[in-house]
Image: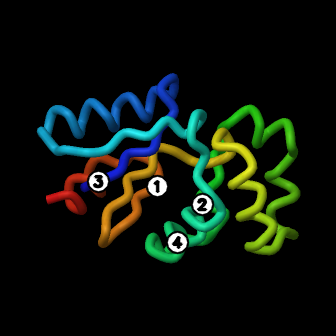
Amino acid sequence: MLKLICYPKCTTCQKAKKWLDDQKIAYEYRDIKLENPTREELSLWQKKSGLPMKKFFNTSGLLYKSMDLKNKLPAMTEDAMLDLLASDGMLVKRPLLIADGFVLVGFKEAEWSESVR
């Protein structure tokens, strides 16, 4: 079963959830604020996605901006990035759509449509 990891107040997450519901696609919902992804989950998802670790950061988030991560990330190791992402779900780009064969970060309807069919 698909896993949808979201923040309920995030409008992009709301669009992604609505899209899945409209397509009648079953998924398990997880609130990222209540259940932060673990370091192990993030590491696994990053490998499965094929994306660089920096793509897992919510660059438009207030926490990202207040921590000045735009300037700090380039000098950080992947291990340090994982520790940071695992420390607070608000740093993680969302929604995340997790399946056995893929991990999608952010909501792009065409990409999701192609992957979940």
Q: Position of residue 73 (x, y in %)?
A: 80, 61
Of labels 4 and 3, earlier in sequence is: 3
Q: Are marks 4 and 2 in contact (CB under 8 Å)?
A: no
Say few, some or many: other residues with alpha carbon within 10 Å of mark 1 (under 14 / 14 to 19 / 20 or more).
Answer: many
**N-term mark: 4 or 1:** 4
The amino acid pointed to by label 3 is Leu
Report whether 114 appears left or right of 86: left
Q: Position of residue 30 (x, y in %)?
A: 44, 40
Q: Which mark is residue 55?
A: 2
Q: Measure how far apart labels 1 and 3 are at the Cα level.
A: 13 Å
Q: Quadrant of the C terminus?
A: bottom left
| Nearest-to-viewer mark from 3 and 2 | 3
Residue at disc 1, secondary structure: strand
Q: CA distance from mark 3 to mark 2?
A: 21 Å
Q: Which residue is mark 3?
A: 2
Identify the residue under disc 4. 44
Badge nearest the viewer, 4 or 1? 4
**Residue in view at x 21 percent, y 53 percent:** 113
Instruction: Identify the amino acid type marked 4.
Output: Leu
Residue underneath mark 1: 105
Q: Name the element at disc 4.
A: helix
Label 4 packing within 10 angstroms: few (<14), some (14-19), many (20+): few
Mark seen at residue 41: none
User: CB atoms at circles 2 and 1 under 8 Å apart?
Assistant: yes
Tell me the SS state at disc 2: helix
